[in-house]
Structure formats: structure tokens, C-alpha cells
Image (tube, coloured by chain):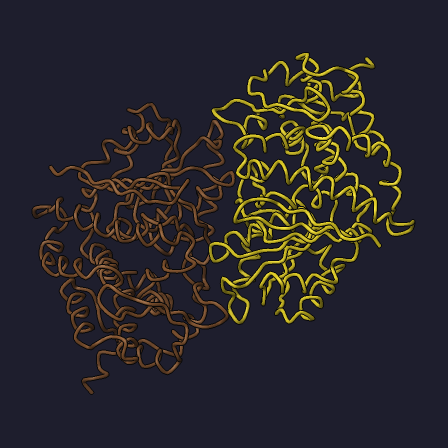
Chain colours: A brown, B yellow
Amino acid sequence: MDEPRTIRIDLGPRSYDVRIGSRLLDGLGQWLGELGCRRAAIITESNVGPLYGDAAESSLRDANIEASRITFPAGEANKTLPTASAVLDEMLALAPPIDRGTWVLALGGGVAGDLAGFAAAVALRGLKWLQCPTSLLADVDASVGGKTGVDHAAGKNLIGAFHQPSGVLIDVETLRSLDRAELINGLAECVKHAVIRDADLLGWIEDHAEQLLARDGGRGAFPADVMTELVARNVAIKAAVVAEDEREAGVRAHLNFGHSIGHAVETTVGYDVLRHGEAVSLGMVAEAHIAVLRGLWNVDERVRIESALQALDLPTRREGLDADRILPVLAHDKKNLGGRVRMVLPSAIGQVDIYDDVTEAELRSAIEELDPNAHGA
Amino acid sequence: MDEPRTIRIDLGPRSYDVRIGSRLLDGLGQWLGELGCRRAAIITESNVGPLYGDAAESSLRDANIEASRITFPAGEANKTLPTASAVLDEMLALAPPIDRGTWVLALGGGVAGDLAGFAAAVALRGLKWLQCPTSLLADVDASVGGKTGVDHAAGKNLIGAFHQPSGVLIDVETLRSLDRAELINGLAECVKHAVIRDADLLGWIEDHAEQLLARDGGRGAFPADVMTELVARNVAIKAAVVAEDEREAGVRAHLNFGHSIGHAVETTVGYDVLRHGEAVSLGMVAEAHIAVLRGLWNVDERVRIESALQALDLPTRREGLDADRILPVLAHDKKNLGGRVRMVLPSAIGQVDIYDDVTEAELRSAIEELDPNAHGA
């Protein structure tokens, strides 16, 4: 078995380690103990809890850490303030009462991390927390950066807090239980990382596409080493961006490539119809189109990205998208300033910049571009 | 008219000014404009909104700041997550949609400051906010330190965030509309500041007790200069403590003198029965009793504090307090660590220390001491 990898997220007094490898969940309690945790509330959701909740709990108990478990209903549709409120009710009803020495352990995919992290951020005005992501999307995206929060009818992640965890433990073995669609969901963010920072990573993904998609519900051989490498490379990219700009005042916005239009598409179509990664894939195609329209990017590179997305089974076109519904949502993006749509556009694979002069005509053209019949008519 | 006073809250990149004086509300919009605000959501409650909401709004509009107003029902009983959620719903429904350049203006007493500050902390993962307190308690306590939050059935302020404002504007003229009981409420915290840090302030309060209580619903002469002096001295004390310990890891706990038992009494009796200052007054008497029991403090100084509280019409005894109900609430105090009750006890007027070895017997004796019949039996 490969050695686990450790990546330091460098945020001054809020720095922490991300540990990535195979079978790390067994050592969860020991690590928490080393970090000074004596009591933890494990917050998980109804899909992941039954799979890994017992393992997490026994690991904690073996390390003499008092553990309680709180489970909320799985799914992005439940990533809401009422769900967070119900989780807080359970936390505050624990006996003996929790205090500021109590930790939160967030166990699950992006929804569990965001919601449990938010509960940690606001319970007693802030508890320490350790994140234990179990989906590829959470591994490569939500595990770094300290963004926590819940969705609102008006848009995704509109309520939340920046609250850095004190550690992230990624056991790639948990990806065995991930269904193919969720795996692909995470791969979209990997392509994004390549486009904004790392042309080499794109080549690596292209070379390993088959292996990345090979594991299938635990039937085939599980490429733990390839997964560890994939996650470590992506965490390192995100870590570098976040270390430069913790509160999203500047370059951290680069991580939003594909997300301006992606989020708006996701909100319009419905969080439970379209997966986040699928929306981001469509968003990258649409935003790449704007970059090409502006002469920032050449068509060949754009075609290469679309091919990579297709090789990973990610969608690059979708029927029925309605610009008249998507544009108002875009106007509500919380990264906007002064009512202008901010957008990250590439000028090469590995290089992007921020623009706030994107026009309505460009946005409409980009959304039309996503129509599979647009060029075939 | 006296010159306004400015006190700098020194928190590195989160530093801000507190401006204190008469008729400052007229200049609110100008100051916000200088701070870079172009749009603000005024969050206020149903008592204060009708009194000062229009003035705040016109001041903002005169400074070309787009202003919306959101009003929630007044009262500590409404300082809850459901109320915060309703306020967030209104904020996120504003048109055009708010963005990260939108400010929150918290207008009102402690409840408005805590709840609006919390809404600012979690809307879009954090908006800038300016606090405009209108009660003496909020002026001398909640205006400094960045604590925001809401109450929970399990206890006060159990859900919240540290989120520093970008400025605090205290117009002492707003104290004209404060009823006498609310004025007295704030004076309890002033006595607390004297006990933990400033023996001179206690003398000043004793000397000015009559003037401090003289203003009465706008009928008599309003001692704006005395009020400005009182608020400025208290803000300076709290500012020094908070600057030393922003996240309440050490000396900031000194501010909890009177609050361990005070909060527990308040929770047990009911937030709407007992005012916060009354509860803190009782808490100070009880905790001072423990200090004397332990030989830390002499009886004369304790008697002096009780006399000062009585001169300000604050309660020092209360019938019907039940130790069996108060003790479990004390055990839930979010400042506890490892299940031990933490308490701040004085050794002189102006000097306190933190103890975590207070026994159940001492707590029971302190609560018995609050019984008006205990010594008369």
C-alpha cells in the first residue's frame, strides 16, 4: 500500500493538514486525539452514516474520545437552514451539554461537510471541526478552503460562514461506495483545476481517464494509488489558491471557473435534477465559449477541454436551458459586486483571469451554445 | 454641545472605530459613505424601527446610499434562529439581489445588534456591517467585541458567530426614548466593568448615580454629556479587554463576571421576566459572595458594590430562585470547558481572576444568599 500523503493548508494560525490515503479511517480517532479532541459530535447523513458511521465511532472510542452521532437526511435538497437548525437542536440537547472543547466530525460528501461545518461554525459561536469527506467532489473541492453553509430558495450556499477545519482526513477507500455518477461529479472539478492552474494535470487526467472510471461499485479492482494521486494533486492546487486568498477577495475567485453559469444552470434546472459536477461541466463549456468569442482563448484548447469532459462522461450540452430564467439567477451570484456579473475566463490551459464586463449578449450566446441542436439545425 | 468621542477597537485587520456623542445619527450616512458603503439593509426591530428608522434611512439616502429596511418583532423572546431565518429570507428577496458589497446596518438595542450582526455574519458567508445601538446596554456591552448570535431553548446565545462590525455609531440622544428599566439594565454592565478593571469608574458612577437616573422618558433635562462620558469610559474598558483577547480564549472571560450565575438565573426565571442587567446584578452579588467565602475579597468591598447596585435601582435579592433548576443550566454555560463551571471572581475592585474549581456547595450557598429571607429568618 502506498504511503499516505499529507498536504499542509497554509493559513497562518488557521493552518491545517489534509491527509490522503487508503484505510486512513482506522486512524481517525488517533489523529483526533493527537489534535487534542476528547469529545466529538459526528455529523453525517442518512446515506453515508450507515456505511462509515460505525467505523468512525469505534475509531474514536478506541482513542478514548467520547462520540455522539447525529444523522440528517441525505441530499442537496436537505442542505437548508431548517436541517442545520435540527442538527443544532440535537447538538444542544446532548448530555452532558457540549462545550467549546467539543469537536464536530463532518462525515460524508459535500452536503455533510458544508452543513456540519456550518453547524460547527455557529454552535457556541464556533467549535473546532475535522472533515472526513467521502465523495470525490468533497475530496478535491470542499475539503479545502473552509467554506461552510446551506442553500436558500434564492440560490446555493447563500447562508454560511468561512470556518476552517482543524484537519481533513480523506480515506480514498470510501470512494469504493460512490456510484459512477458521483465519481464523475468530482472529476468535473479536477478538470477545472487543470484549466485554471495546471496543464500537466489535464494530460494526467486524459491519460488515466479509463482507470479513473474503472472502479465500479466495488466490483472491479480499485485503483487506490491512482485515486490518492488524483486527490493529492487537486488538493495541492486548491490549497495553493486558498492560501493566497483565504476570504475570496482576489485569486480565489479563479476557482469559480465554470461556476458562474454552472451555478445558475443548477439553480434553474433544480439541484436534484442536475449534479453539481454536471452543471460545472456545462458551465465550463459555456464560459469557455465566451473566452473564445472574446479572442482570449483558441478553439483548439476549448475543443480539448470538451473532449476531456466527454471522456469522463461529463455532459457538454443540455436541451431546454432557458436564458431568460438563467440570467436573473446569474445576477444574484454572491461573487458579483455592484450588480455586475463577475466571470473567470481562461486564456490558456492553466491560466485564467477575472472579468466583470461580460455582456448579456455574450451570456445569451454561451447558453445557446449549450443547446445540442444549435449547430445541427 | 460636546465633541463626539472616538474609540478605536484595535483588532489588527478587523479594527474599527466606535463614535459616541449627541446627534450622531444625522451623520450616519456620511460615515457609511466614507467607509465605502453604497447599499445597506437596515435591520431593526418593531420598537426601535418606528423611532429611528426614518432618520437612519434619510441619512443614508442623503449620502446616496441605497437603503432597504427589514423589521423583526422586538424582544429577547424573538432573538431566535427562526427570526434570523425570516430576516435572511427578506434580505435574499431584495431586488436587485444583495451582493458582498451590500452592508447591514443594525439599528436597535442588544437584540437587534446580535440578530442583525448574525444575519450579516452568515448572509453570503459574511457581509460588512455597522452597528447603531440605541440602548445603554448595547452601547456599553454589545457594541464592542463582535459577538453576534441568537438564543436557543437550551440557553442564551448558543448559536452565533464572532463577526466584527466595521464601525459603531452611538448617538446618546437615542437614550432619551429608553425607559427607566432599560437604562438601569445597562448600568449593571457599567458596574461590572468597574469591578473587573476600573475602581475609579465605580467612584464616578457613585458620584453620578442621581444624574444617571434623572432623565426620564424625555421629561427632564437630558444629561447628554454625562451619558457620553459614561458610554465612552465603558467602551474603552471593554475595548481594551477585547483587543487583548478577541476570541475569548483568556482575559476576555473577565467580562463574564456576574454572568455565569446571572445567565443561569435569567434562563431559569425566563428572559422576558428578568432583564439581562437585573440578572447580571444578581449574578454579581452571588459571585461576589463566593469570592468572600473563599477569602479572596473582603466584605466591605462587597457591601460597596451592593450599595452601588441598589443606588442604581438594581436588584440584589430575588425570591423563589431554585438552585436545583439553576445548577444544571450553569453546567451548560458555553464558557465551560471539560464539564467544569468556569467563574470569574474578584480579589479587589478593579481586579478579577478566572477559577474553574468552584464547588456545588459554593454555588448553592451563593444562590441561597440571593434569597431576601435568608438572613431575616
Percent position (x, y) of residue A248? 41, 57
Q: Vertical placement of A330 versus A181: above or below?
A: below
A90 relative to A290 in the view: left or right:
right
Please identify the residue farthest to the bottom as the structure is shown. Answer: A377
**Residue in view at x 70 percent, y 25 percent:** B321
Foreground pick, A353 / B195: A353
A32 relative to B195 in the view: left or right:
left
Figure quadrant of the N terminus of chain A = top left
Foreground pick, A225 / A8: A8
**Residue in view at x 43 percent, y 58 percent:** A249
Percent position (x, y) of residue B133? 69, 51
B123 relative to B210 in the view: left or right:
left
Foreground pick, A225 / B195: B195
Please identify the residue farthest to the left as the structure is shown. Answer: A221
Number of on-image labels: 0
Foreground pick, A309 / B82: A309
Say which quarter of the image contains residue A224: top left
Percent position (x, y) of residue B213? 86, 40
Percent position (x, y) of residue B152? 56, 41
**Residue in view at x 44 percent, y 74 percent:** A328
Q: Vertical placement of A267 versus B226: above or below?
A: below
Say which quarter of the image contains residue A72: top left
